[in-house]
Image (cartoon, grey):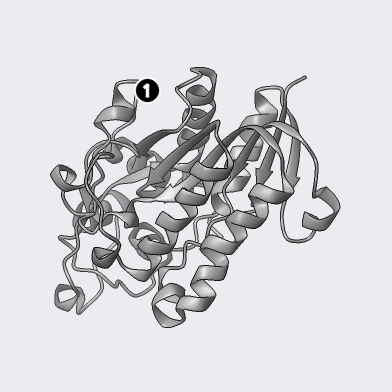
């Protein structure tokens, strides 16, 4: 039986990956804070590190804390969990231009001075993986929805919370369950060591569209919020995988929440 270690297995992304690994017949070591020390040293055919910090504000507020969460934790995982193959979950925030697919291809030249603190830390973590895990795949993600969602514009609309972006802001979302399936499909392709891919659904949807699908009214004052756009270039991933669209992803997610077959955090 093939073995798979998922680091961050109780988290939003990691829980979907651990469930997919079990569905595919892997013997899964699900690692999180409560059992990290007990699992340390467990070898695996495949290690997937989904434990990266996703709270961008931490890195901007306290770069040292952000560095610990996004960089030091990756070095620790590389040391503590020997792997035949390693998949690192990274972020499209590495690109200074997350808004335009013409400027965030995998081969886009990057300068640390143009990055946010959060993006710079994610870039440093990738470099650690490249150095210490020769047989690796790095995936840079855009927005996500899925079971246990606890933040983003979709969550705010569905829970009636305040909206922090303009209704005409546009986002790209992939479901964590689709992401998990894609990761294992990519691993089975035995891509060249050191492969880097942007990974998400295709296209963007606006907050206004999502509000319509959810049947909710936009909160007062939303038009005063900043207008944001986020879309990764996923052309390389689309050459290897059949990617869903953001529109169908979000509509399915909203329907599952409304029907009670999927719960938010």
Res. 9 visible in picture: no
Please identify the residue farthest to the right as the structure is shown.
38
Residue 59, placed above or below residue 137 = below
Of the pair 47 and 182, the residue shown nearer to us: 47
Q: Is residue 134 left or right of residue 204?
A: right
Indicate the position of residue 260 as horizontal and vertical percent values.
53, 47
Res. 142 visible in picture: yes
Indicate the position of residue 244 as horizontal and vertical percent values.
33, 30
Residue at 74% x, 35% y: name it.
Answer: 28
Q: Quadrant of the C terminus?
A: bottom right
Residue at 28% x, 47% y: name it.
Answer: 172
Residue at 45% x, 33% y: name it.
Answer: 194
Query: Which residue has dot 1 on it?
Result: 241
Q: Is residue 205 left or right of residue 191?
A: left
Residue at 80% x, 45% y: name it.
Answer: 41
Of the pair 144 and 30, the residue shown nearer to us: 30
Q: Quadrant of the N terminus?
A: top right
Please identify the residue farthest to the bottom as the structure is shown.
61
Indicate the position of residue 75 as horizontal and vertical percent values.
61, 55
Circle 1 residues within 10 Å: few <14, some 14–19, many ≥20: few
Indicate the position of residue 262 as horizontal and vertical percent values.
54, 46
- Tell me the quarter of the picture where residue 138 sits: top left
Circle 1 sits in a helix, a strand or a loop, which is it?
loop
- Tell me the quarter of the picture where residue 140 sits: top left
């Amino acid at each position: 039986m093939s073995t798979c270690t998922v680091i961050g297995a109780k988290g939003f992304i990691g829980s979907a990956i651990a469930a997919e690994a079990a569905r595919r017949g892997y013997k899964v070591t699900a690692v999180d804070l409560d059992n990290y020390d007990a699992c340390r040293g467990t070898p695996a055919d495949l290690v997937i590190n989904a434990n990266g910090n996703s709270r961008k504000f931490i890195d901007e507020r306290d770069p040292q804390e952000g560095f610990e969460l996004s960089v030091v934790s990756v070095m620790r995982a590389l040391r503590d969990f020997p792997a035949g193959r390693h998949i690192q979950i990274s972020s499209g925030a590495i690109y200074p231009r997350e808004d335009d697919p013409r400027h965030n291809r995998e081969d886009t030249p990057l300068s640390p001075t143009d990055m946010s603190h959060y993006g710079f830390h994610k870039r440093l973590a990738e470099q650690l993986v490249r150095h210490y895990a020769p047989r690796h795949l790095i995936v840079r993600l855009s927005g996500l929805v899925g079971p246990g969602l606890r933040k983003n514009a979709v969550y705010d609309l569905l829970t009636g919370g305040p909206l922090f972006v303009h209704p005409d802001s546009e986002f790209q979302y992939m479901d964590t369950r689709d992401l998990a399936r894609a990761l294992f499909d990519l691993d089975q392709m035995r891509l060249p060591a050191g492969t880097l891919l942007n990974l998400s659904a295709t296209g963007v949807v606006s907050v206004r569209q999502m509000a319509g699908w959810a049947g909710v009214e936009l909160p007062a004052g939303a038009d005063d919020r900043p207008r944001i756009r986020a879309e990764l270039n996923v052309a390389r991933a689309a050459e290897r995988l059949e990617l869903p669209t953001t529109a169908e992803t979000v509509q399915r997610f909203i329907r599952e929440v409304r029907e009670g077959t999927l719960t938010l955090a």
